[in-house]
Structure formats: structure tokens, C-alpha cells
Image (cartoon, helix red, strand yellow):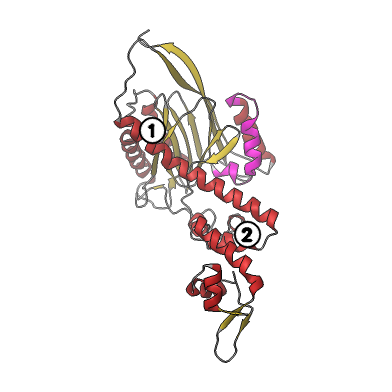
Amino acid sequence: MLTIGAFAKACRLSPKALRLYDELDLLRPARVDPDTGYRYYAVAQLERARLVAWLRRLGMPLAEIRRTVALDPAAAAREIRAYWARVEAETAVRRDLAAFLVDHLTTDSRGSGEDTTMLELRYSAHSDTGRVRPANQDTAYAGTRLLAVADGFGPAGAPASSAAVEALRRLDTDEVPAGGVLNLLEDAVRGAEQAVRDVAGGADDIGTTLTALLWTGSRLALVHIGDSRAYLLRDGELFRITHDHTVVQSMIDEGRLTVEEATSHPQRALLLKALTGDGTNATPDLRLHDAHRGDRYLLCSDGLYGVVPEDRIRGLLAAPAAPDETVAALVGAANEAGGPDNVSCVVADVVQTVDRAGV
């Protein structure tokens, strides 16, 4: 048996951390002296302790570590691989913003008259009531430059979601300057917030989520508030590029809840941020994404991802079908799963055309 000090030195965890992991039932000592309360650990526990230490260095939340270390090695490896894929997807968001800033601050050396690669969107949108709800409070929109999904709630949820999207629709016809796109989008969201307040008449139980992408010709600017989502399918891999503004997501982030536990949590639909009638919690996420030819984007309300597993969503998005066919398949999958909520989907493909500058 090793004392807590000797064990801490051997596994590179501090005694303080070992005491915490004991309290959390993550790493119990082999024996506790009934008189002194001293903790003693078996040499056989070193491998588990070292794994805990490594996973903490990865930044994995404690709740996920507890689940991972209890698995057999093969299953634990799959959990770690899945966790790191989520980390990489979130890091990619910051990487894309950094790349945009570098490009924006660097003088463009391309001369006129050269062949330039042009990208454009091909898109489709649909909103469906589902099989249970008496009315549809979602709004979905897709245009040349703007993609948007909003999920309204409260007595006037449908007018709230419609007003939010309508406030952004002017961006679909205005020329979008690449350099100031985030400022432009932020101003438009303020207009959407005011539009929702006008509909709600100041009531705090009326509001809407809003997830939208604005196309500049080479990049997509994202605005997001609430729990509607945006996904990116790139090279066959599906990445979620939004972060839910919900109570359960905050608990997952803090390591107090697992993803599996969140699906049945009684507060899973409770929002921390949205566009509301009183405007008290409307601080959206704003980000930029470089677009690649072949990318496919999905915007959806929780009526889709709440009932259709992510691997099924990925499979439908990866199928060689046009955006309108894919939207129909996604909505159909949600209704086949019971359709307990309104379901809205926007699918947009980034396609390439080649033109000659100045022609």
C-alpha cells in the first residue's frame, strides 16, 4: 500500500486532486485508516490514476472521465477519440476566425484579369409542423446570401420567429462587404431583437432562437442564439459549429452532466439565451467560417436533432442528393421518429464556378 503522498508522486496527481476524486467517486483509495482518516492506495490503482491524469491534461470534464475510465480499453479509446473530435471542431471555429483576420489584414496581391475561383450556395429550406404540435412556431429561410432557422416559443412564438428572420432578410439582397460582415450581422440581429420585442409587447415568455449564416462569396458569417443548431459536413465528417445556450449544455460544459444524461434531463429545453420580448438575454455568438468547395451546411431546430440520432443525420447529409431532397429526407426522418415537435431544416451546398474577373 502507498500513502497518498507517495501515490500522488507516482501518478503525478496532487494529493488535493486525489481527495477531490475520492469525493467524486472517480478514484477511491484502497483503504482509509478508521482512526486517522489517512488514505492508502494500492499499486494496482496507478494505471487508472495515470489515465485520469492524462485525461485531465486533455481537458476532459470530470463526468466524462468517470465514464471513460470505467470502460474496457477499446471502448475507452473510442470515447477519447470522440471527445477529441469535438475539441478539434470547436478549435476549428477559432482557427477559421484567425485565418480570416490574417487574410483581411494582408494586402490582396491578385491582379485584375486573372482567373478567379468563385463559390456560390445551392440551397433549400422547409419547416414542418410535425405530428404532435397543433401549430408551427418555427421559421426557415434560404436565399442567395442568407440562411436562417428560428424556433419561437410562448403564446406568440410563431410571429416572434417570423419577425426575427424577416429582420435579417434585407441582408439577402444587400451587397455584403467581406471586411465588415460581422458588424453588419450584429446590427441586423439588433433589428431582429427589436422586432421580437414589438411582437411580444415586452412579455418575457415570448421569444425565439435564431441561427443564421450570411454568405459573402467566400466565407460564411454565423450568428447564433438559443438551441437551434448549425452543422458542417466536410469530407464526410459532421461537425456541430454552434453551442447550445441551454441549462443542460452549461452543466455538460462544467462536467456535472453527461451527454447521455442530458437527453432525459427535465430541464433540457430550458434556454439560457434567446431573443425575448424583454430583450434581457440577447447576446448572440458571432463567428466566421471559411467555405470550401464541397461543404454542406445544415441549420435546424431541435425538432430534428432532438429525435434523429447524429449518425443518422450525417448519413442523410452525406447521401448524393440535392439540397431539396436532403431537406425532405431530414424532415421525414424526424416525423418517422414520432414528430413530437416542429422541425425546420435548411441545407446549403458550397459549389464552385469559374469566371474571369472583369467579364
The numbered disc on residue 242 is none
Q: Which residue is mark 1?
A: 168
Residue 14 image offset from top left, x and y in percent: 49, 71
308, above or below 355, in the image: below
Q: Residue at x 59, y 62 (%)?
A: 51
Who comes first in sequence, dot 1 or dot 2?
Answer: 2
214, above or below 114, in the image: below
Taking depth in this image into account, of 220 and 28 the one nearest to the observer is 28
Tell me if residue 315 is in the magenta stretch: yes
Provide the secondary structure element on which disc 1 rests: helix
Residue 97 image offset from top left, x and y in percent: 39, 38
Horizontally, residue 99 falls left or right of residue 350, namely: left
Taking depth in this image into account, of 143 and 312 the one nearest to the observer is 312
35, above or below 133, in the image: below
Q: Quadrant of residue 85?
A: top right
Q: Tell me which amino acid carries mark 1.
A: Leu
The furthest residue to the top: 359
Horizontally, residue 19 falls left or right of residue 204, namely: right
Provide the secondary structure element on which disc 2 rests: helix
Measure the alpha-carbon separation of dots 1 and 2.
Answer: 43 Å
Q: Residue at x 48, y 57 (%)?
A: 250
Residue 54 visible, this orientation: yes
Q: Residue at x 29, y 31 (%)?
A: 105
Residue 149 image offset from top left, x and y in percent: 48, 37
Q: Which residue is mark 2?
A: 68
Q: Which image quarter is the C terminus in?
A: top left
Residue span colored magenta: 302-324
